[in-house]
Amino acid sequence: MTEVAEFERRYLERASGALGGAALDAISLARDPEPRGRLAAGWWSRADLAGVMVLPNPWDDRSGIERFERACWDVTNDVLASLAPRLDEVHDERLGFEGWQLVLAPWLLHLVSGLADRRLFLLAARHCAPGVPVLAGPASGPPADMAEAVEAIRTTTGNARLLTAAAEAMGLPAKPGPDARPTAAGAVAGAGPGIATRAALLARGAAGRLLLGGERGRRVVVVGHADVSLRQALALRRAVRGLRISQAPGIPAQQPPLDPGLRASLFGGEPRDAAAVTAPGTEGLAELTNALLPQLLPRSVLEGFSDLDRAALEDYGAPSGVVVGNYAAKEAENLYLARCAAAGQRLWFAQHGGFYFQGRANAQERLELRPGSTFISWGSKGPGVAAAGSPRLARLAGTHRGGDLLMLVEALHPPDTYVIRFASTPLGNQQHEQSQLLAAFVENLSAARAAARLKRFPAFYGAAEAPRPSALEGLASDGPSGARSAAAWMRSSRMAVLAYPDTPFVEAMAIGVPTVGLWNPERWELRPEAADVFGALAAAGVVHHDPASAAAHVESVWTAPAAWWDSAEVAAARALFLDRFGRGSGWLEGWAAALG
C-alpha cells in the first residue's frame, strides 16, 4: 500500500470515530453551511460551526502534507504526459510534454491538489455515511481560462461545482443544494479586455521595449511581476554587456465559446467507472483527474488556442531569454515560455514570495525549480539556484522612518480555507488560528493598545463569509497618511506585528521596522536548514509563538523599541535572516552574474 493510500485509510478510521455513527441528512460542500437538518461538512468549515458536524482536519497529521505534495506533482505530470500529445495533435503543434507542462502545470497542479483534498472528503463521506446524499452545486461549462479555473476552486460556489462533479464520478448520491441552479458559464465567449485597456497595455509594453531595448544584443524579456523597476532594469542592462531587456505587457486574450465536438475529439472514450476513481491513493486521484478533465480543461487552451497563440506573439515577440516573475496560471505568458524553451532559450524564474526554501514542503517550488533553468532567489543557494537577491528588497532596505503606530499585519482574509496546493503552512480551517492568535495578542496589550492599527487584507472571496474575531474587528484600520501597502505602513510605524512568516515578514526585516512575528510553528514547519535562523530570531525576541509573551515583549520595549531592535543580538539574528532569505544589497551583481 502506498504512503498516500495508507494515510487515506487511517483518516477514514479517524473520521468514522469522530462522527460516531451519527445519523445525517446530507453532506454539505459549502464553507460555512446553514444548518438545515443534520449536516456534515468538510475541514474547510470552521470547526466550531453551530449545528453542523465538521469532519476532523486530516492535515492536523502533518505527515500527510509532504506525501500528498509529492503525489500531486507525480499525478500532474502523469496526466500531462497523456494530455500533451493529444493537444499537440488537435492544435498541430510540437510543444510536447515539456512545453505543455510550462503552459498548464500552474493550473493543473492546483486542480490535482484541490481534488486530492476534496476526494478525501468524499471518500470519508462514503465511508462514514453510506447512502447519505451530497448537496449538489450549480452546473457549469469549462472555465474561460486558467485564472478563472484556479479562482473558482477557492470559492464556495466553485467548490460546490467541483465536488458535485467529483461525487458524480465517484458514484455518490446527490440532491440539489441551496445553490444548484445551472449557469451559462462556457456557453458564450468569455469577456476579454476592452479596446482602451488593450491599447494602454500595448503602449506600456512598447514604451518598455523602446526605453530598454536600444542597440542590438542578447534580448531578455521580463514577464510577470519580477519586481524590477525601470531604473533597475537600466542599471542591469549597463551591468551585463550586450543585454537588452524588454518589459512585456501581458494582455489577456478573448475566449471563444465551448466546442463540444472538439472536446469529444480530444478526450473521447468511455467515462471511467466509480471503482477506478475511488481506488486507493494516487491511482484513484489520477483516475478522478482524468475523468473530470473534459469539463474542467479551460477553453483558452483548447477552443481559444489560435487566439492565444496570436496574443503570445503580439505581446511578447520572438523567442528569447526570459526572466519570469510570479509564474502562475497565465496562458499567453506561459505559451511564450514554452516557445522560448523549445527554441533553446534560457529561462530564469525570479523569487516573488517569502516562504521559499523555508517550509518543509512547498508546491510552488516544484513549478519554478526546473531542470535546465535558473532560479533567482532572495538569498538561498542550491543546485540551479542563484542567490542573487531581490530588487524590491533593495528598494525597501533601511527605509524605516518611524512613527507612533503599532501596525498589525493580518494574513489572507477571509482565510483561503479550501486547499489548492500542499505546503507546510496552515491548511483548511487551521488558517483561522492566525487571526485568533493576533486577536489574543491585542487582548493582552495595555499601554500600546491605543496605538494598534490593523492592516486589513483586501477581501478575497467575500468578507461576510468569515468575520474577524471581535478584538480585531474593533481595531482602527487608518494607517499612516497616504500609505496603502503593508510595506508603506511599516516604514511609518513605530513597530510591526506580523501573523505569518511570509513576504510581509521579509519586507519588515528589510525595511528595518522593529518587528515581532507571531505564529504557530506546528503549522509553519521549517526545514532543518531554516530552523537555526528562526531559532536565533526567537532567542532575540523577534519571533513568538504565544500571544501573551508577544504582547508582554511589545509592552516592554514600546517606549523605545530602537534600543531593543539595534541591540547586538537582534542585529545578528536579523543579518543572518536577511542573508539567507531576504537579500537586497548586491542584487545588481547577483542578477548580472545569473544573466551574464
Image (tube, rainbow, N blue to C red):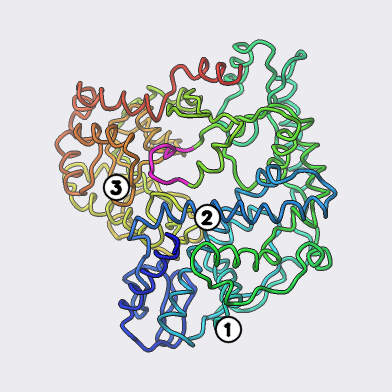
* Position of residue 434 measured from the top left corner of the image (x, y, whole percent): 33, 53
Mark with earlier residue (1, 3): 1
| Crowding near the residue tagged with mark 1, few <14, some 14–19, many ≥20 C-alpha atoms within 10 Å | some
| Amino acid type indicated by mark 1 | Pro
Residue beneath disc 1: 176
Identify which residue, 126 or 503, lies in the foreground: 126
| Residue 361 included in the magenta stretch of the image | yes
| Residue 510 included in the magenta stretch of the image | no
Residue beneath disc 2: 72
| Amino acid type indicated by mark 3 | Trp
Q: Secondary structure at mark 1?
A: strand
Would residue 416 be seen by someone viewing this image from the given angle? yes
Residue at 20% over, 21% down: 568
Q: Secondary structure at mark 3?
A: loop
* Position of residue 134 measured from the top left corner of the image (x, y, whole percent): 52, 81
Residue at 31% over, 60% down: 469
484 relative to 450 in the view: left or right? right
Q: Secondary structure at mark 2?
A: helix
Q: Does the magenta stretch mainly form a helix, a strand or a loop? A: loop
| Amino acid type indicated by mark 2 | Cys
| Crowding near the residue tagged with mark 3, few <14, some 14–19, many ≥20 C-alpha atoms within 10 Å | many
Residue range highlighted in magenta: 353-362
Q: Quadrant of residue 451?
A: top left
Residue beneath disc 3: 519
Q: Are marks 3 and 2 in contact (CB under 8 Å)?
A: no
